Amino acid sequence: MSVVVALTVCGAALGALWAWIAPPIHTITALTRSGERVDAFLGTEADNLFVAAAMLIGLLVMLAIVAAVAVWQWRAHRGPVLATALWIGLVAAGAAAAGVGAALAHWRYGTPDHQGVALTQENRVHYFTEAPGVFAGHSPLQIAVTLLLPAALAALTYSLLAVATPRDDLGGRPVDDRLRR
């Protein structure tokens, strides 16, 4: 339980870090000559939609690898229960990072009202700075992959550490020299 709670707290801290370093999205709402409203990204700002989501995944993957190695150091509890707590904690960390990151980013940049801005013939253009998205898309599959990828990499790291251990008890108990003879 302590592993899950610690990873969730670390995920929330990573979400706050992400909200601080993720690049915002600059957009424009303009009035065309025919009087039609047009929304567009400025320059290559659309790339920041991917960059911000990739940054969150990168932070979560970093947490996953460090957490797997740190949890492996807890010798007395090595095994499937700790591995299960690790991946559950990392899914919770991903959810906490996404929730905290999205909330702080929207608090920082606000929610733009593209349709509510008053555009006139004299004032045809309005610029917005928007919060980046935490996910690469809105489909349930994309959200699930974002949450499960770090957990899968942590499980892989933990299993590689287990495979590299020559003892059946995964090195959890002290070696009894009487049994070696």
Image (cartoon, helix red, strand yellow):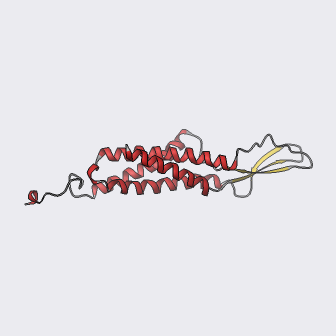
Visible in this render: residue 54?
no
Residue 9, percent from left and from top: 47, 48
x 11%, y 60%: residue: 177
Residue 13, percent from left and from top: 52, 52
Quadrant including the C terminus: bottom left
Left or right of 135 in this view: 45: right
Residue 53, percent from left and from top: 58, 51
Left or right of 34 in this view: 22: left
Against 134, residue 165 (above or below) is: below
> Which corner quadrant of the image does residue 85 belong to?
top left
x 20%, y 56%: residue: 167
Residue 101, percent from left and from top: 58, 48
Residue that extends furthest to the left in the rendered view of this protein? 181
x 59%, y 41%: residue: 138
Visible in this render: residue 144?
yes
> Which corner quadrant of the image does residue 166 belong to?
bottom left
151 or 81, which lies in front? 81
